[in-house]
Amino acid sequence: MKLPPPIVGMLEDVETDSRVLPPTALYNEGWMLRLVLHSAARGIDCLPFQIARGARWFSEPSLYTAFAATSRSDKQAEKHTRADGAVGHFDFKPGTKTGLVLRSDATQFVVLEAKIGSRLSAGTTNATTFNQAARNVACIAYAISQVGRSPEQIQCGFHVVAPGPAIAAGAYQGALQRDSLLAAIDSRIQRYSGERRAQLEQWRHAWVEPTLRGLQIGCWSWEESLQRIEEADAALGTELREFYTRTLALSRMASS
């Protein structure tokens, strides 16, 4: 469907005095990630991994969790995690628009978290130490467990895409250590008791630990993506760098 002219006009006017929505509705990390993923899908090598044959990308998928409610009285439960982006062989759960489920023959599943001016969130209402990185990694392991494929059969990863200076300053690395991730997931499991805890401990042993062993984890800078896009397509690279520069500036204004 072609976008109606009013929508195009609203987006074009976000930085004019006649704007009807804030500039950050367009200039944000979500749209920045979409632009980079779109470039990668066109064949530009601008990610820390290659998109596999037959794989797709999707923005803001819902990732299902091993800690979903098992009853109405389950006070430890949590809802799905909304990732910024995912790449791999997946479809969507029937009856949902964004509920990601891996295909039975999946060989790639990578989750990306996009950051411009913020850090990874510390936890959830029911588990204050279950940080954003641990939640995503746990969801990756759960998705693999649900399709029944061995983690060794799937190229899986979790990458934080962020400004280079923030990465260099160590803003994200602490949360991405394998031992820290496993400890955060284990702490989440220990909030349960009885049979439910036993089930989750079995899942951790059978799926979380093998997934973590093969998981590609790390930070990737927007600047590296932009440089590679510019080298492959100078015109597109210039446009995306201007978009990124504006996104950075608006983020700094919002935090000042």
Image (tube, rainbow, N blue to C red):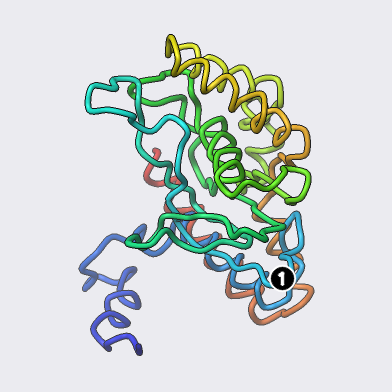
Count neighbours of disc 1 (C-alpha within 10 A) and say few if under 14, some if 14 to 19, many if 20 or more. Answer: many
Residue 122: x percent and y percent?
A: 47, 25
- Above or below: residue 58 compared with residue 239: above
Residue 196: x percent and y percent?
A: 44, 18
Instruction: Tell me which corner region of the image, top left, top right, bottom left or bottom right, holds residue 202.
Output: top right
Instruction: Tell me which corner region of the image, top left, top right, bottom left or bottom right, holds residue 177.
Output: top right
Q: Which residue corresponds to the image point at 33% horizontal and 74% vertical from the top-left?
A: 11
For the residue pair 184 and 143, the one nearer the viewer reads as: 143
Q: Secondary structure at mark 1?
A: helix
Q: Amino acid at mark 1?
A: Ile
Left or right placement of residue 69 versus residue 112 in this view: left
Pointer 1 residue? 229
Q: Quadrant of the C terminus?
A: top left
Q: Which residue corresponds to the image point at 43% horizontal and 42% vertical from the top-left?
A: 81
Q: Which residue corresponds to the image point at 66% horizontal and 41% vertical from the top-left?
A: 165
Q: Which residue corresponds to the image point at 73% horizontal and 51% vertical from the top-left?
A: 154
Number of labelled discs?
1
Residue 33: x percent and y percent?
A: 55, 59
Residue 183: x percent and y percent?
A: 62, 17
Left or right placement of residue 201 versus residue 249 in this view: right
Left or right placement of residue 79 versus residue 229 in this view: left
For the residue pair 103 and 49, the one nearer the viewer reads as: 103
Left or right placement of residue 164 versus residue 214 in this view: left
